[in-house]
Image (cartoon, grey):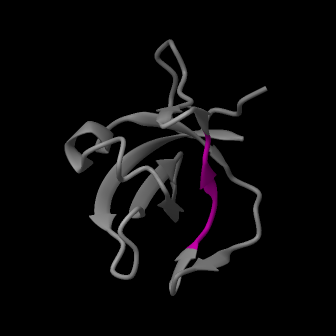
Amino acid sequence: LRVARVEEVSVHPNADRLYVLKVRAGAEVRQVVAGIRSQYTPEQLTGRLVVVVWNLKPAMLRGVESQGMVLAAAAGDTVSLVAPDRAVEPGAEVR
């Protein structure tokens, strides 16, 4: 698990509920597909720190490669991103 900063958000071209995120952890940038479109706007996500599962094998999600997974908690219809509660640098390991 790594802390990453969301640098770019775009709408998935083939899915109504998905975003394609560009996230940076240290010097590395990855593309992550996340099903959080109903909960967050691109403006709410851009620049935000999130926790990403960094060691997953890349997967194709509706025709777009995802190179990780953003962690979120869900309760009913509400989804909340998992994020550090203090200032940490992108790339920090989550223990």
Magenta stretch holds residue 68: yes
Observer-nearest of 95 and 92: 95
Where on the picture, by quarter, is residue 75?
top right
Return the residue found at the far left: 43
For the point 25% across and 49% down, which residue is it? 42
Position of 61 relative to 72 (above/below)? below
Q: Residue at x 43, y 50 (%)?
A: 36
Residue placed furthest toward the bottom: 63
State the image coordinates of residue 47 (x, y, percent, origin top left).
Answer: 31, 39
Task: Tell me where the magenta segment starts and ends, as one range.
Answer: 66-71
User: Picture quarter containing residue 1?
Assistant: top right
Left or right of 28, for residue 46: left
The residue located at (41%, 60%) in the rendering is: 22
Q: Is residue 30 visible?
A: no
Residue 89: give x, y in percent of width and height: 50, 29
Question: Can the viewer see residue 62?
Answer: yes
Is residue 31 positioned above or below 93 on the image? Answer: below
Q: Is residue 1 magenta?
A: no
Task: From the top left corner, tell me how far across and down residue 65 is, in percent.
Answer: 55, 78
